[in-house]
Image: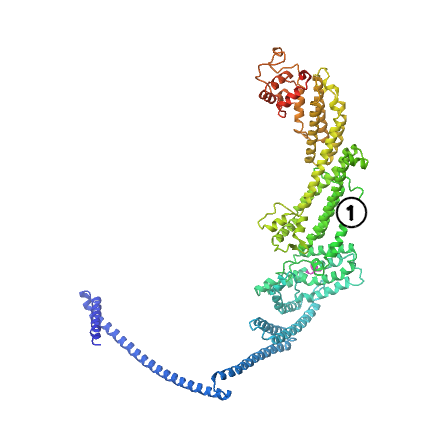
Amino acid sequence: MAQVQPNHVGDIHMRVEDYLDDQIQTVADLENVEDLLSRVQQQQDLLRKQLAEARQTLSESRANIHEKSNALQQSAKHFQTQQKDLDRRLQILTQSEASDDATKRIESRMGKVRSLEIANGYLELVQRANALTKRARDSLAREPETSLRAYLQLRAIWNKVQEAQPGAEGAAPQLIYLLEQEVTQLYQELKSVLSDDFRKTLEVMKWPGKDLNLAGGIQERWQRQVELLLELQEPDLLKFAADKLKFSSGITPDPVILLPLKTMVQPLATRFRYHFYGERPTNRLDKPEYFLSHVLDLIDQHNNFISNLLGPIIDERALTSDALEMVYTDAVSSFISALLPMVNAKCLSFLPQITSEPQLLSHFMREAMSFDNAIRDSWVYVPIPRMLNGWRGVTWTILYSHGYFPTWLAVEKDFALARYTSIKDSPDSREIDLDAEPSQTKPTKGAIRVNDLLETITDRYRSLSSFSYKMNFLLDIQLSIFDDYHNYLHDALQAYIAVSHTAGRLLQGQSETDTFGLKGLESLTKIFGSAAYLERKMSDWSDDLFFLELWDELLTRSKANTGNNSIGNNLRVDDVAAKTSSAIKAHSADEETESDGSGLFDQTAAAYRRLRERSEEEVVRAFDVNVRNALRTYGKQPQWSSLGDAPSDATALTPSSALDSLFQTISVLLGFLAHTFALGSLRRVTKHFCTSIQREIYDNVVMHNTFSAAGAAQLRRDLSAIEESIEKSTRVSGAIGASMKRIEEAVYLLALPASKAKAGTNNESDGWGFDEDDDDQPSAIDARGGSRYGEDVEEWGLWDAEKRVFESNEAAREALADMGLFHLSESDARNILKRRIELNS
């Protein structure tokens, strides 16, 4: 301590010295020493005062600590005394000297005490519930608002007890049951009283008359009563909306009816039963549209009142909480929800009477779907609660909930098949409809009627909300009819193919003319036209929005298939893919697979496409047979090698009489196709027909005969007449195209004049007509003067051509190019030139 004191004093001296150095730095600062001393004295007095106060506070704190310490010691001594006394008492009570045994016994007694406390809590809760029930009943007649508040408090207590049950492991089932009984009974009493008061107000209003009485505070009373009924129902609405099991189980619950509207609809329902039940003339089994249109009229009649008076009330209630905003819909939709039960009841009383009458059942379902469409589209109906995934309609209730779909499907299928059978058996069903689209291949009247029938069937089920039901209609009715009609056309084609062979004709007693002539061609055209027409219609259907949505949902379901191989009620992936499109299975196996433009009618359209192509092949084969028969005698004429002079004008020649049969074939058969085939199909058949003529003339006429100049000129004239006849019969400009270029060039080369040398050539220079100067040679097209057969002045002669063609392959190619002959090879040109008498030796 002696060592610390000097250091402390030294520190003080240093601090004083620093302070003085800071305050007195100049001579002028010495004049303010008195002020400095005064400030220092004031600070010293203040510090002394603070020090005194701190010492006093310290003294008081120490005294308090001493008192509390003594009190704590006394408490500890008292606790020890009580502990000893408690141990002694426990030993006396349990007659045991062991403290653990005493503890166990006291714990059992404490458990009873806790049970008593819980029971006391239950009794207090029951007492509070009884008080709320009594208050609600006492004020029910005089102050319904007070009764409603008491009910809502009781309902809140019940909800809290229910929410606490899982945590309490269901410890109070009796209390839950008691509160549930009280809440349910009080709800029924409140609903009855409020509904009766509301009904009386409606009578004063003269609802549902046209001239409503809203004067004298009636409208305000009506509005208040509506609000009370809505408040009474809102807890149930919220509970219904929160019950997710109802929406995840796959069963869509019925829309909720608001209590005010349930009362308002009662007089409307009474009138409805009066008119549409019993022996009234408006209650007719064949006129379901009577009661359905009546309901639509009711909606239209009361739309303004519901929208203008009830709408604002519902909108205001919806704004009270986010949950209610998700529950309430517009007022008109709420009104529709109240009307639907009487529609469903009438339909269900209607159906048992008409299930044995197919026509009545079919008509009823059409009218029911029209009603659903009107509700859904015209009134934009949204059920309560709003989260219901769309309204499926009255038809859904009838078909799914009450199981009438199989009956209706069987009725529609029987109707469709009966109509389809009558179409096939109709005398004019196999007639070609020449009044069909002018730019398309003409189908038979039967094919058009089948398509109309299938479109009518689509309209029958287009409004259904169930994917499975739509697919059942498509697979069981429409695609079945498509398949059967395909088999019908296929059988007709097979019958034709059978008689197109000699053995088949002998068995059937038909001639070759009947088979391959106009009669046979007409049969093939009917098959071809019908197949092409229905294939085109299926393509149009695949682009229809209805079938696009159905196809998209089908792909979605197949992709979501979890391995049970099912995509709907009684719809297996393999079965559906076999009837519609294999893309379904690929899409199901690979989630990344695109649809590649596939559609519902891929399989059926492919079958009709194959049938169309096969029937077109038979048309072409029929033309081949006719060409061979018509040109059989043409190549055997002796005129080809006659030594007469070639006429100067080939057009002055008359076509060979041996071609009369071919001209008749062209006129009759091609003329018939020109009236029945689309332009593209007609061009394909005509091209093949021309190719057949070219092949027959080239192989059996040109290559089997020798020709003089006159014979070549005649052949040239005949070919020109054939092409003119084809273009005239088909009435298509350029129908021949390049199909006969080879024979045209062959005839041109064959008909080169032997007396003519090319320009600038001296014919006497060589006995064979050879000329050493080949420059400045005009092209063959120029030499033919722009005409297909070169009726104008020729620049090439037979000897010129013979010299160049036989000189070498390169010279032959150059000569053919100069003459514009691009469809003949060097060997072809040499063989053709050898057919001329002049060169044959």
**Residue 199: % across, % down:** 69, 69
Query: For the magenta stretch, what is the residue range?
Result: 298-302
- Quarter of the image with the C terminus in it: top right
User: Which residue is farthest top?
Assistant: 764
- 37 in relation to 835, above or below: below
User: Which residue is farthest front?
Assistant: 503
Quadrant location of residue 427?
top right
**What residue is drawn where x is 75% and y is 27%?**
630
**Residue 39: % across, % down:** 24, 72
**Residue 588: % across, % down:** 61, 51
Nearest to the observer: residue 481 or residue 836: 836
Quadrant location of residue 283?
bottom right
Residue 676 shows in this picture: yes
Q: In this figure, which residue is indicated by the disc labeled 1?
A: 421
Quadrant location of residue 333?
bottom right
**What residue is drawn where x is 63% and y is 17%?**
802
